[in-house]
């Protein structure tokens, strides 16, 4: 039997945000690999072996998946959101690049998912309507100096900025530092969106001016979006404001 490896995105949390092609791949899989809470989102069934692992073991997990696929198994590696956004797809290709040359010949496919920034943006309006970027605030895989440089340049260039992994127990100060730095670059009224547990029962989404943004509002399941000077609020009497960024901009900001 020839094996295969699919790297699939499970979306932000809700079952109805998993694409039909990912569902089909999960139904065909013999082995499921990923960070334990994501593996737990897939229902158990006969014929499916679930291999949950710790969050920090991405390369080991990728090599494990490749070895199983090389043995003829139908392996699905799962990530939350989209597997190509700060997730397992790049880890698998790093392992292919550095690993056993025969792995290059395997049947490997990436199936997209709805990334947290798209799920969060859709909940509140259209904050990503103009140019934007995504920055991973974790400094596990890059020096903090580089994060600061990218934040400053992105703010200066007028991008809306989606911040993934804003903080964790091991990284308590990074988001506070990032907000302080952004306050040096942007006006205080720029909207900041804290979108937590989007599409789950615990979903919470708040928009505050940058001047009042407090890092403690965020946790590990929060996506933070920093608006540009063009990002606007549409106030509503009976609900949260819509937040959007117009598609066009005149002079450089
Ligand atoms: N591949 C994932 C991102 C993995 S990094 C994707 O495309 O969404 C993990 C980070 O994603 C979290 O720290 C948080 O910033 C964000 N995130 C994941 N799920 C989320 C959700 N349901 N609501 C808000 N943010 C989420």
Image (cartoon, rainbow, N blue to C red):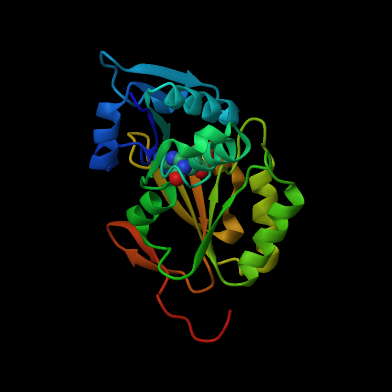
Q: Nearer the viewer, residue 193 or 86?
A: 86
Q: Where is residue 99, by image quadrant?
A: top right
Q: Nearer the viewer, residue 125 or 165?
A: 165
On the question of residue 108 being in view, the answer is yes
On the question of residue 34 being in view, the answer is no
The percent position of residue 58, horizontal first and vertical second, equals: 57, 31
- Viewed as shown, does residue 157 lie left or right of 48? right
Please, which residue is most extreme toward the bottom here?
251
Whether residue 156 is situated above or below residue 23 in the rendered picture: below
Q: Residue at x 58, y 26 (%)?
A: 60
The percent position of residue 212, horizontal first and vertical second, equals: 58, 56
- Viewed as shown, does residue 236 lie left or right of 156? left
Q: Residue at x 67, y 36 (%)?
A: 171
- Image quarter where the C terminus lies is bottom right
The percent position of residue 242, horizontal first and vertical second, equals: 35, 62
Q: Nearer the viewer, residue 187 or 108?
A: 108
- Image quarter where the N terminus lies is top left
Whether residue 94 is situated above or below residue 249 in the rendered picture: above
């Amino acid at each position: 039997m020839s094996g295969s490896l699919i790297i699939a995105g499970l979306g932000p949390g809700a079952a109805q945000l998993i694409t039909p092609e990912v569902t089909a791949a999960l139904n065909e899989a013999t082995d499921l690999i990923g960070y334990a809470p994501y593996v737990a989102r897939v229902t158990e069934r006969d014929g499916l072996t679930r291999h949950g692992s710790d969050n920090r073991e991405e390369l080991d997990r990728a090599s494990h998946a490749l070895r199983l696929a090389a043995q003829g198994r139908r392996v699905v590696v799962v990530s939350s959101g989209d597997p190509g956004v700060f997730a397992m797809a790049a880890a698998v290709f790093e392992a292919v690049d550095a690993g056993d040359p025969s792995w290059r010949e395997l049947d490997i496919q990436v199936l997209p998912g709805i990334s947290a920034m798209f799920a969060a943006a859709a909940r509140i309006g259209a904050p990503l309507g103009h140019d934007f970027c995504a920055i991973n605030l974790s400094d596990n895989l890059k020096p903090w100096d580089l994060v600061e440089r990218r934040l400053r340049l992105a703010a200066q260039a007028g991008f809306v900025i989606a911040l993934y992994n804003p903080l964790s127990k091991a990284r308590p100060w990074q988001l506070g530092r990032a907000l302080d730095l952004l306050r040096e670059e942007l006006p205080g009224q720029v909207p900041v969106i804290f979108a937590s547990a989007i599409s789950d029962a615990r979903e919470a989404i708040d928009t505050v001016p940058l001047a009042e943004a407090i890092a403690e509002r965020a946790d590990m399941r929060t996506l933070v979006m920093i608006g540009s000077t063009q990002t606007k609020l549409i106030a509503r009497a009976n609900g949260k404001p819509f937040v959007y960024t117009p598609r066009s901009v005149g002079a450089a900001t």
